[in-house]
Image: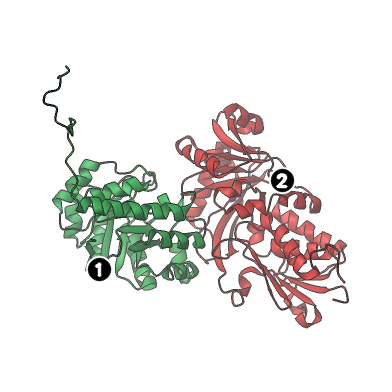
Chain colours: A red, B green
Amino acid sequence: MTHTPRILVKGAGVAGMTAAVTLAERGGVVTLYEPGGRVGAGASWMAGGMLAPWCEAESAPPEVTAQSVDSVDWWEAHVPNVVRAGSLVLAPPRDSGEIARFGRRTTHFETVDGAEIARLEPDLAGRFHKGLFFADEGHVDPRRALVALLARLESLGGKAVFSAADAPDDAAFDWIVDCTGLNVRQELPTLRGVRGEMLLLRCPDVVLHRPVRMLHPRIPIYIVPRADHVFMVGATMIESENAGGMTVRSMTELLNAAWVLHPGFAEAEILEMGTGLRPSYPDNMPRVVREGNHVFVNGMYRHGFLLSPARAREAADMIFGNSVGNAG
Amino acid sequence: MTAHFYGVELSSPLMLGTAQYPSPDILRDAVQAAQPGVVTVSLRRESAGERAGQAFWSLIRELGVPVLPNTAGCHTVKEAVTTAHMAREVFGTEWVKLEVIGELDTLQPDVFGLVEAARILSEDGFKVFPYTTEDLVVAERLLAAGCDVLMPWGAPIGSGKGLNNIFGLRALRAHFPDVPLVVDAGIGVPSHAAQALELGYDAVLINTAVAKAGDPAVMARAFRLAVEAGVLACVADPMEERDMAVPSTPVAGKAMLA
């Protein structure tokens, strides 16, 4: 390559935003294009934002952990409001066997008793007697993080186009990095959507400092604290591409988990019900695929915030070669 | 030697559920390792609407194993009947595993609704595999409603407790020697599956025990071996249990202690 590459990044979800920022940092002239009108028009807007490499090992292959151990560092270096307070894994007494199973499948945690749970989360004092604490994990508010990445992209000289009327012409770019999820099913035929539903609650009566995972044999649910007494409760995993509104069943499951965690959630205000489709490959692992000057970053499944920094790096390595800053 | 289910002989007495696997790839690996006679698949209603579950159902069809759709998660006769119709349309089969859940906490079947739904579906040409308890009278009613197969539970769904009422299951087997019987639900480890087949059951249905194992494909293989052992044991006619030891060498001439 004889000039600074002009790169068009399509899609302003977490895959697109991390790719755009990473490519701009490596010296690319980046244009971001998102016809949805804003950052996070897809599934990323509904994400939990848990940066939990070790918890995810419970059901994800070991690669997820291996590729995301430094994810929280990446986010901390790029956006404000990354919280490094760990994750807490709990179960109602009747499902306490699930804690043992979770512990067998994961590493990098300590087993905590009622007193330690109360020290970590005073509002949960007396409610749970056994749990797992993953001290090195973090979380981020996905919406604020995506907006912050856009600002960062612009500060690096990147341009963002949010209207289909102004759609950039592919021919004007050296590279096209496509991060548009299920929009490219024609090109990536093994992609499928996995439905997820989430709630945003406002609950001044309960204070949590870190994400709490409530284990259940069929319906594991997590609750992530956000600013201003807001909590995200998620998320269902349904093999369906129906992006329609939340079902009563899912709503009941999500609310029930919150209520079991703390009865104070009974008084919470329901701010938002969200549904999204997670773009997923058959192994539920994201991929970076190159075809000519097109690079597809896709299939984030439920690990967008956790794995997208590593995938962005992979895409940048494809475009720039492995040595950082080598655009020549 | 596998029983005929509505005239079809299955290649294995193992029936494997397709829910709750970590990924479709791992599900496929598990199916390859288990070599099941059928796979079951649930049609959650929001998936069925507008064929939104198509991508996943295609993966199921591509497994190359006969599909037994189920009505998991249905709580009323009407829901179960509607779901069965969707299943027939989606998978092009008359077979349906009928679940009508009566109790949210234990997922115990609503046997009254079950009999009613079984009658409606059988009259409509469905081949119904009813998920029931080990109750003999309910079994009679299900057969009268048109079922030619019974699927009593071993223990509540997902509990992994094994065969909770072995006497009841034995009685059912003895009572209906010619009806294909499948232990469905509650099987946690391969020995439970082997035990069901040793009792003379014709098949076992497993889902959580494989899907939620640390390595589903390895556990699937363990179940394949277990059902093979169970079938062979049944064919071989096991010895009778006794309360006293039977010395394998003569005791005559030895000092009798106590």
Name which residue lies at 83% across and 62% down. A324
| Quadrant of image for the N terminus of chain A | bottom right
Tell me the crowding category of disc 2: few under 14, some 14 to 19, or many 20 or more residues within 10 angstroms, Cα based: few
Residue drawn 18% across and 43% down? B239
Residue B108: in sight, yes or no? no
Question: B201 left or right of B253?
Answer: right
**How far across and down, in percent of the image, does residue B75 sit?**
35, 54
Give the residue pinned by disc 1.
B8
Q: Residue A119 vs residue A176: left or right?
A: left
- In which quadrant is the C terminus of chain A drawn? bottom right
Along the horizontal axis of the image, is B236 left or right of A80?
left
The outermost residue toward the top is: B258
Tell me which chain the residue with mark 1 is part of.
Answer: B
Which residue has dot 2 on it? A227
Q: Are marks 2 and 1 on the same chain?
A: no
Q: Is residue A31 above or below residue B25?
A: below
Q: Nearer the viewer, residue A140 or B76?
A: A140
Q: Residue at x 11, y 26 (%)?
A: B252
Q: CA distance from mark 2 to mark 1?
A: 59 Å
Q: Residue furthest left?
A: B252
Q: Residues within 10 Å of mark 1 (few under 14, many from 20)?
A: few
Residue A89 drawn above or below residue A17 = above
Q: Chain of mark 2?
A: A
Q: Secondary structure at mark 2?
A: loop
